[in-house]
Image (spheres, rainbow, N blue to C red):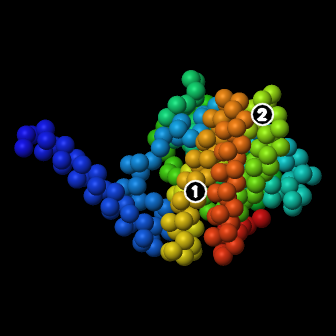
């Protein structure tokens, strides 16, 4: 056997071993706390493959505008239902900023470290117990989105979400916007593709954010449904961009099925989306 053949054979064996190790690791309970192990990341798709940066940016700016209407008004901030919605928005901004800081195709003039600032500040916005703290956190989010840069910004990892209830409530809002927008897809595809990009980012995040108390036998289905959500949302984003109504309809059906199946197998057996609810 030649050196080249040995090298090729060794590489093939290494890939086989890596896949086998990943399969067996998925069955261990400790993964419920950290999502997938580092060996699983070898097949992780680039963010641009499921969520275009421009759509993510549009959604994060939309949510920041909504958050500002709550934070900058003492009357609004004092309403419990508005505070609840602020938590949903903050958690969603954090996922969007995470996707952007790890994005492989950022628009010109933006940089990953700016979105790290926004990511961390969104977490502070979620935890804000009073209006001045919330105002300060929101301003820091805006500073990051405006291109603020700090040295030694370590990229956060996927799988940090622990407020699943708030995130999934915002997911339902996006699904509603998509369903309403389907009738106008040919004229106004942007709302569909932007909300689809958000849902794709959420699907990828939940792939790594397996709830800590999820029974072992449901951990792999959780990951499979997360992938199905991400991939069907990515397909919807692409179909909306192309104004392909047939493909968009098929993608919406697949997206809806991934959610319904997950609810039937997981949520309805254990109310996991309520884990971490604090508002």
Q: Position of residue 35 (x, y in %)?
A: 49, 61
Q: Could you say which quadrant of the image residue 39 lies in? A: bottom left
Q: Is residue 234 above or below residue 31?
A: above
Q: Residue at x 45, y 60 (%)?
A: 36
- Vertical arrangement, residue 215 with respect to residue 48, above or below: below
Tag 2 near tag 1, CB within 8 Å:
no
10 Å crowding of disc 1: few (<14), some (14-19), many (20+): many
Q: Residue at x 49, y 34 (%)?
A: 104
Residue 132: x, y in percent?
A: 79, 50
Q: Which residue is mark 1?
A: 226
Where residue 273 sits, quadrant-wise, is bottom right
Question: Mark 2 vs mark 1: which is more N-terminal?
Answer: 2
Residue 242 sits above or below residue 229 on the image? above
**Which image quadrant is residue 148 in?**
top right
Taking the image as drawn, is residue 115 in sight? no
- Locate the C terminus and report the quarter of the image it occupies: bottom right
Quadrant holding the N terminus: top left
154 on left or right of 64: left
Q: Secondary structure at mark 1?
A: helix
The location of residue 167, given as percent across then percent down, is 69, 56
Residue 48 visible in the picture: yes
Q: Is residue 74 left or right of residue 112?
A: right
What whole-number distance in Å separates the C-alpha atoms at marks 2 and 1? 25 Å
Q: Position of residue 40 (x, y in %)?
A: 40, 55
**Most extreme residue toward the right, as rendered?**
75
Which residue is found at the position 66% from the left and 51% from the top?
255
- Farthest-out residue, top: 108
- Assess disc 2: are there few (<14), some (14-19) or many (≥20) residues with their C-alpha within 10 Å of its C-alpha: many
Disc assigned to residue 185: 2
């Amino acid at each position: 056997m030649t050196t080249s053949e040995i090298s090729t054979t060794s590489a093939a064996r290494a890939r086989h071993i890596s896949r086998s190790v990943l399969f067996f690791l998925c069955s261990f309970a400790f993964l419920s706390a950290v999502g997938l192990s580092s060996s699983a990341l070898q097949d992780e798709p680039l963010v641009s493959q499921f969520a275009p940066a421009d759509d993510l940016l549009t959604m994060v700016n939309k949510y920041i505008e909504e958050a500002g209407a709550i934070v900058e008004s003492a009357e609004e901030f004092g309403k419990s239902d508005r505070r609840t919605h602020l938590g949903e928005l903050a958690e969603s901004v954090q996922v969007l900023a995470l996707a952007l800081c790890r994005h492989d195709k950022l628009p010109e003039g933006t940089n990953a470290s700016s979105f790290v600032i926004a990511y961390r500040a969104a977490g502070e916005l979620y935890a804000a117990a009073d209006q001045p703290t919330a105002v300060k956190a929101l301003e820091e989010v805006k500073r990051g989105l405006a291109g603020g840069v700090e040295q030694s910004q370590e990229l956060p990892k996927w799988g940090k979400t622990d407020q699943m209830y708030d995130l999934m409530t915002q997911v339902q809002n996006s699904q509603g916007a998509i369903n309403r927008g389907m009738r106008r897809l040919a004229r106004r595809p942007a709302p569909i593709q932007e909300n689809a990009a958000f849902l794709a980012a959420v699907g990828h995040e939940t792939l790594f954010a397996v709830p800590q108390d999820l029974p072992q036998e449901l951990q792999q289905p959780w990951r499979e449904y997360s992938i199905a959500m991400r991939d069907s949302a990515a397909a919807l984003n692409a179909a909306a961009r192309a104004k392909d109504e047939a493909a968009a309809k098929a993608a919406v059906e697949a997206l809806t099925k991934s959610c319904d199946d997950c609810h039937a197998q997981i949520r309805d057996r254990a109310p996991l989306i309520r884990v971490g609810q604090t508002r």
